[in-house]
Image (cartoon, rainbow, N blue to C red):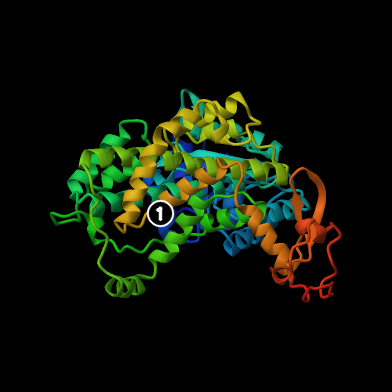
Amino acid sequence: MSDTPMDYAFGMIGLGTMGRNLLLNMADHGFAVAGYDKNQKQVDLLGQEGQGKPVKGFMDSKEFVQSIKMPRAIMMLVPAGAIVDSVIAEMTPLLSPGDILIDGGNSHFTDTERRAKELAAKNLHFFGMGVSGGEEGARFGPSMMPGGDAEAYKVMQPVFEAIAAKVDGAPCVAYMGPGAAGHFVKMVHNGIEYGLMELIAETYGVLKTGLGLDNAAIGQVFTQWNEGRLQSFLLDITKDIFAFNAPGTDHLLLDDIKDEARAKGTGKWTSQVAMDLQAPIPTIDTAVSMRDLSKYKELRVQLAAQYGPEAGQLPGNKEEVLRQLEQAFYFSMIMSYAQGMHLLAKASEEYKYDLHLATIAKIWRGGCIIRSAFLNDIFNAFEGNNQLAHLLLDGKVQPLVQGSVGGARSLIAAAVTSGLAVPAYTSALGYFDAFRTARLPSNLIQAQRDYFGAHTYELIGKEGVFHTQWTGLRDKVESPAGPQANQAPATPPVPGTKQSNEEPLNKHL
């Protein structure tokens, strides 16, 4: 490949593992590509790994930009946050109107919205694209979630479809929607990932502590599960972890790893935006919290000594408990996916993304970290009805839930009784039980809020918003009309004023 300018069809900024592997993937598919990094070591690695391929690395940003055919298409794969803005600031003066800039990192969706507007004002095309699959996916076929500038994506579509993972011959990449839709979908993907990983970790705890299985037996359980309806990428790598000894030893590397989980923030972002949109995702929230809790190792050791004894083994026949555990995992896995899909539906409505949940499930079936056999069921559910309000309403998902919830109840009850920590499991069951409850006790919360803060409430079968003067009612004999006599329709009182028999209003809660 000639080194003269205007040779390369695509550029990559950031030649870490992901960026380098994506470039090599493109080169394997016949695309001439250039890479840029300020680290000489990364540029040298690209040269070594790309030997004989149409790929070249640069350390000079101007030479890099000039080497790419116009209109240029350049992708960034750098850490989210200020670094993305600094790269954009560095590149913008070197680009020409009509050039395309792509953020392939895990940027927060609000940053993507801002950057798109800023670059559009400079006549530059920009879109955010989530990339899932890790280093192996990047090298041999990732799942990709582009969104934003639709015309710019069409230019890149042949490249991304060529390098994406394939399922039944279909590429695992598709345009998600306008604005920051691509990065939003990837963020929720990562939230689901958090939930699934926490469930697998809790399963490991049940197998190890609750059933007393050794590492070989635990590895066999994960291997068997991965050959059935639980088949997934995360279980596949988990079985491999239980077969990997620490170098030069006869024991698992896993046993040498500290039990303090780290995170890069995408799970937290998922929880935060879910609360903003009032879309409950308790299993994902719990997974985020458990990573945080795990970091308090010293405190956990102190509390373990103070509040012992440690959790005991689960009672009952071991094979029956294993059967219940498989059902519990399947049930909780469904709940984790269902929470994520519900959040996507709410976000699509709020942010006008026009997301197609069937398409999202379709491209998640291959290449990405959360790929699993169950995604076929999700795809079928939303392919049949893209307006489906919730995955649990699907007629074919319902029997899967009903067939596994009994095992989940038995397993969770036994684990809690034995002192085993299974918070993600319990949150999944609580989510399901609450959602299938036609009348929740939340009416009491509304009464309490109205009592202490005059926040008002609504009545069953009656239009309007109401407030009751609750203060002092406990000291009075109720009139024949009952509490209705104290109800006033819905003009909320002015904060700080007094009404008859009422203390100053508290609006803090």
Quick check: 241 above or below 292?
A: above
Quick check: 486 left or right of 39?
right
- Taking depth in this image into account, of 153 and 363 the one nearest to the observer is 363
Total marks shown come to 1
The quadrant in which residue 395 appears is top right
Q: Residues within 10 Å of mark 1 (few under 14, many from 20)?
A: some
Quick check: 470 left or right of 53?
right
| Image location (x, y in percent) of residue 363 | 52, 33
Which residue is rendered at x = 83% and y = 62% of the image? 492
The quadrant of the rendering that contains the C terminus is: bottom right
| Image location (x, y in percent) of residue 274 | 61, 52
Which residue is rendered at x = 85% and y = 69% of the image? 494
Residue 339 showing in the rendered view: yes
Quick check: 372 above or below 264?
A: above
- Taking depth in this image into account, of 82 and 497 the one nearest to the observer is 497
| Image location (x, y in percent) of residue 507 | 74, 70
Which residue is rendered at x = 25% and y = 50% of the image? 314
| Image location (x, y in percent) of residue 72 | 64, 43
Which residue is rendered at x = 48% and y = 42% of the image? 335
Residue 234 showing in the rendered view: no
Quick check: 466 left or right of 367?
right
Quick check: 235 above or below 270?
A: above
Q: Secondary structure at mark 1?
A: helix
- Taking depth in this image into account, of 408 and 502 the one nearest to the observer is 502
Quick check: 216 left or right of 399?
left
- Taking depth in this image into account, of 68 and 280 the one nearest to the observer is 280
The quadrant in which residue 60 appears is bottom right
Q: Amino acid at mark 1?
A: Asp
Give the residue at mark 1.
Answer: 44
